Amino acid sequence: MITPRCPICEGLPRGPLCKTHRQELAKTLHELRLGMRDLKRVERREIHYASHSGGTSHPAFAPTPIDISAADLYDQVEDTIQDVAGDIGLWGGEASQLLAKLASRMGRLADAPNSGRDYKQLTNALHRVRMRTTPPQNRIIHGHCLNPECGAQLVGLPDDTMVTCQECGSTWAVAEVRRARRERMTGQYITGKPKLAAQWISQETGIAIKRGDVSNWRSRGLLHPVETDVSGVWQWAKPELLACAEHMRLST
């Protein structure tokens, strides 16, 4: 018996999703329901997210006006949800209603001929919603687009599994984007004290790293810097620094 090939795992245009991506799709539908609810609150200015770095978000209530950009995004994502629902014969309805129906018909959605396209569209929609409803200080830089003709910076959230380039529209697995970034920096080093290494990581990833974090990684054997002739100055391998920062962010 020939096992069907997953369009996401193997980059195929059509075919049923594998078990792993069925689970991811179910998670995406659930999170999209919550995200659309939050996006609607942002649209109504019931929630305001601080634009400065640091601090936390605070709700602010105001009757008018609505947030036009949030309203436009809501409409665009609702259109995407309606298109996906149409692939399994569900027509019309609001986003919340269609997402509930899609969740109850996961088997049909995952086995639909366009399941791979639908998976990517919903994943991208969720990413756009979460980026709009997440404070800027909680966003990070995954790396750069793997499209050789693009290379744009890919900004997202710590728990992203997929990310869509907003420049060329290509969708990539975050793990591959981060792996490519580390490989690109193989053989490259930062020479300086732990503070300088921490500053470089923060600039490269958008993750807030302190000098003490770098020193702690070294003492635990996660980093293997080469000592220089200057006291307190080390030569730090960039791929190791990135790997430690990514692991710390994912485990928090």
Image (spheres, rainbow, N blue to C red):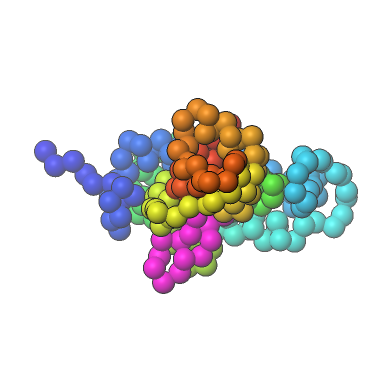
Residue span colored magenta: 143-159
Q: Residue at x 77, y 39 (%)?
A: 56
The x and y percentages for residue 94 are 60, 49
From the image, give the main secondary structure of the stretch colored magenta.
Answer: loop
* 203 left or right of 143 in image: right
The x and y percentages for residue 187 are 40, 54
* As drawn, 64 above or below 243: below
* 214 left or right of 83 in image: right
**Residue 154 lies in the magenta stretch:** yes
Q: Residue at x 64, y 39 (%)?
A: 211
Q: Is residue 93 visible?
A: no
- In front: 206, or 63? 206
* 29 left or right of 5 in image: right
The x and y percentages for residue 109 are 39, 44
* Residue found at the very far front of the displayed protein: 229
- Tell me the quadrant of the picture where the N terminus can be found: top left
Q: Residue at x 30, y 55 (%)?
A: 11
* 248 left or right of 13 in image: right
Q: Is residue 193 visible?
A: yes
- In front: 131, or 244? 244
The x and y percentages for residue 153 are 53, 61
* As drawn, 42 above or below 170: above
Q: Residue at x 51, y 65 (%)?
A: 152
- Tell me the quadrant of the picture where the C terminus can be found: top right
**Residue 118 lies in the magenta stretch:** no
- In front: 2, or 145? 145
